[in-house]
């Protein structure tokens, strides 16, 4: 049994490596079938993406149209003991942006007009143009409405999983992205993307990349659901999601020892 599982996983890794640069759904056909019930001992894990916890869907799931995030202009405090120098491209913030997205415009007189957020990492943001003047520790304004959509990752099986494999194929202009996020405590308000815990970004896929696959630590109890937020900076964005579960990689240690 262990030999068989290793052979299957080896084939899976070869397939993912071959499709890493341009992951197409044609290549995901075999991988997606891993979402069929994975049985060990007397239990099984059945993990799939769907509209909501009540929807059954073991195939690819295409998200509905993205909707506008509730606020288009927000301010955050800059975190710095002294003014940021001319030429800075990374700005520390007093708190992590709660629901921002790559592509939002950063507004300050010390920043070139039209400068955008290139990346978000914890409490820091990287911007597309360097500062043109020293920046004091005052508020920085973000504009450009993010668009979002939510979907469920359901485990309809009888065994918990500790992580999942997830892939998305996006349709956005090359300079834009779709990010997938989940909240450690569950979203308390999906309209405003409010999370009392930690917002974890699973992946950020650009239109230039088109497709992306990653294995991510998202625990889902048997019969449980995790809500995932897809967020972008363009209204015309679209994405299709695939979820897989591997018996050796994604199930709990207790399950593997059955």
Image: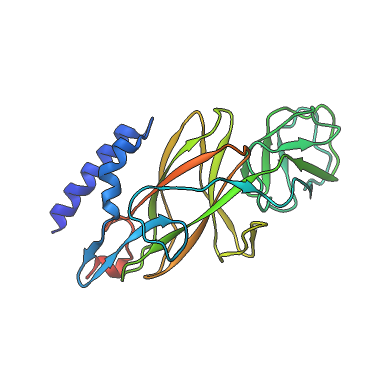
Q: Quadrant of the N terminus?
A: bottom left
Measured from the top left, where is residue 180 in percent x and y?
52, 48
Is 228 left or right of 46, judged from the image as shown? Answer: right
| In front of the other: 236 or 46 | 236
Q: Is residue 55 above or below residue 118?
A: below
Q: Is residue 202 above or below residue 2?
A: above
In percent of the image, x 30 and y 54: which residue is there? 35
Is 207 left or right of 164, judged from the image as shown? Answer: right
In percent of the image, x 56 and y 29: which residue is there? 173
Q: Is residue 187 above or below residue 60?
A: below
| In front of the other: 135 or 185 | 185
Measured from the top left, where is residue 202 in percent x and y?
49, 49
Measured from the top left, where is residue 114 in percent x and y?
75, 29
| In front of the other: 199 or 156 | 156
Q: Quadrant of the C terminus?
A: bottom left
The image shows a total of numbered marks equal to 0
Residue 44, quarter of picture? bottom left
Is 121 left or right of 29, judged from the image as shown? Answer: right
In percent of the image, x 73 and y 30: which residue is there? 115
| In front of the other: 57 or 246 | 57
Q: How is the image coloured?
A: rainbow
Measured from the top left, where is residue 236 in percent x and y?
58, 37
């Amino acid at each position: 049994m262990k030999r068989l599982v290793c052979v299957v996983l080896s084939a899976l890794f070869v397939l993912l490596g071959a499709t890493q640069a341009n992951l197409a759904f044609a290549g995901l056909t075999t991988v997606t079938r891993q979402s069929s019930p994975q049985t060990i001992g007397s239990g099984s894990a059945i993990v799939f993406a769907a509209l909501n916890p009540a929807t059954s869907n073991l195939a690819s799931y295409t998200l509905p149209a993205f909707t506008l995030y509730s606020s288009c202009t927000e301010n955050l405090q800059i975190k710095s003991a002294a003014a940021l120098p001319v030429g800075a491209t990374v700005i520390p913030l007093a708190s992590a942006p709660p629901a921002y997205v790559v592509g939002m415009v950063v507004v300050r007189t010390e920043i070139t007009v039209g400068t955008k957020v290139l990346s978000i990492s914890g409490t820091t943001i990287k911007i597309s143009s360097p500062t043109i003047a020293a920046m004091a520790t005052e508020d920085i304004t973000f504009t450009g409405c993010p668009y979002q959509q939510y979907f469920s990752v359901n485990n309809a099986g009888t065994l918990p999983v500790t992580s999942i494999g997830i892939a998305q194929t996006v349709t956005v202009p090359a300079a834009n992205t779709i990010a997938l996020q989940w909240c450690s405590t569950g979203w308390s308000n999906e309209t405003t993307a409010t999370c009392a815990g930690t917002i974890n970004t699973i992946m950020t896929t650009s239109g230039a990349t088109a497709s992306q696959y990653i294995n991510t630590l998202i625990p889902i109890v048997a019969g449980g659901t995790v809500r995932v937020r897809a967020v972008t900076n363009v209204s015309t964005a679209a994405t299709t999601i695939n979820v897989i579960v591997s018996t050796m990689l994604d199930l709990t240690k207790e399950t593997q020892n059955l």
